[in-house]
Image (tube, grey):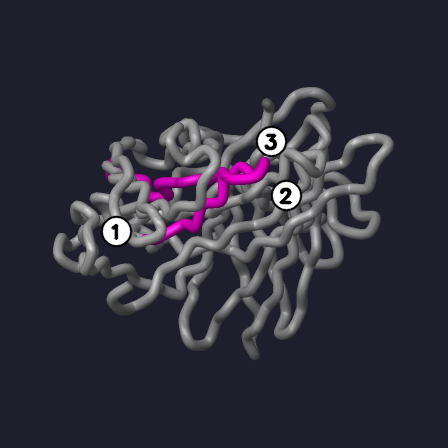
Amino acid sequence: MRILFLIVLTCGALFAQNVRPIPWKNSPIQASAAVKGAATAKAAQAGTARKTFFFPEDVVFPHLATGDGWETEFTFVNMSELAVDFDVYFYNPQGGELVVTLREQPAGPSIVNSAFEVSLGSGASTTVILVDTTPGQLRTGWAVVDYNANTEFRLGGHATFRQKIAGRPDFEALIPMSSYEDYAFLLPINDSAGFITAAAICNPSANLTANIQLQLLDDDGNEIASRNITLGPEQQTAVAVREWFPGVVGRYATLYVESSTDRLSAIGLRFNTGGGNSFSSVPIMNWAGIL
């Protein structure tokens, strides 16, 4: 069964929000080796503690898709008292340049490029759509928002993912921007009763390879299975969890993920195969303390 897994980032038009194409570049995010002991995956057993952490750098969209019936609206909001300028860069799963077509809602002109600069005044917002320009051809990747996030400048945003199939209502799910420091987290899994959980994991850093340990845990936190994957700089993967762990089919579980670097971003989606592949978002879980 084909599952179309997406997260999409877009950004504005050439007029109302002062949006313009700019040259594409490698990811502005730099990584260092994760401090072992701060977040360490261990052989799961009763009483085992895992530490995961939350950080405010919500600037990554770890998966995007366009074409073959998929489109996504993206909303950015300037939560600051000052104007905010930010850049948006699009990457394919191998870390190269991804050219996309953007259009400001409700009826702005289309812009074709792989990187954009956006300016928003205090309290201003923009909603844009990643246009489906390749009927029957699905293109995927990820994106990063580059701006000076501090106490004076803060940007909010979310994606509304939409699948359009003739003869039925459109399916949608909403997901906020992700942190680039989600290098240790838990993802709840439900692969029972016709549901399938998918995960997208992105290494947004431009300088280090991420060696990622995956552990599938049962309801009591005991390890069912484990494996490792590797993502080079700016690389991304998106799969149904059952492709990594076939034993999850028909059950509830939790996926524990930990990277060898301090830069990682992820998101989950759950598909209802009995409901025409309707879908909803599944947030990853991390907390500055012991889980």
Q: Please report the residue visible at 32 percent of the width from the left and 40 percent of the height from the top.
A: 206
Q: Residues within 10 Å of mark 1 (few under 14, many from 20)?
A: many
For marks 3 and 2, the one nearer the N-term is 3
Residue 109 placement, left or right of 212: right
Q: Which residues are magenta?
A: 185-210
Indicate yes or no whether the magenta region holds residue 199. yes
Residue position marked by numbered label 1 in the rendering: 262
For marks 1 and 3, the one nearer the N-term is 3
In the depicted view, which residue is nearer to us: 29 or 194? 194
Q: CA distance from mark 3 to mark 2?
A: 10 Å
Residue position marked by numbered label 2 in the rendering: 279
- Are the residues at dot 2 and dot 1 in contact (C-beta closer than 8 Å)? no
Residue 140 placement, left or right of 51: right
Q: Please report the residue visible at 50 percent of the width from the left and 47 percent of the height from the top.
A: 61
Residue 45, image x and y in percent? 19, 51
Between circles 1 and 3, the one closer to the viewer is 3
Residue 1, image x and y in percent? 59, 23
| Disc 1 residue type (three-letter) | Asp
Indicate yes or no whether the magenta region holds residue 126. no
Residue 83, image x and y in percent? 58, 70
> Could you say whether the residue bearing mark 3 is in a helix, strand or loop?
loop
Between circles 3 and 2, the one closer to the viewer is 2
Q: CA distance from mark 2 to mark 1?
A: 30 Å
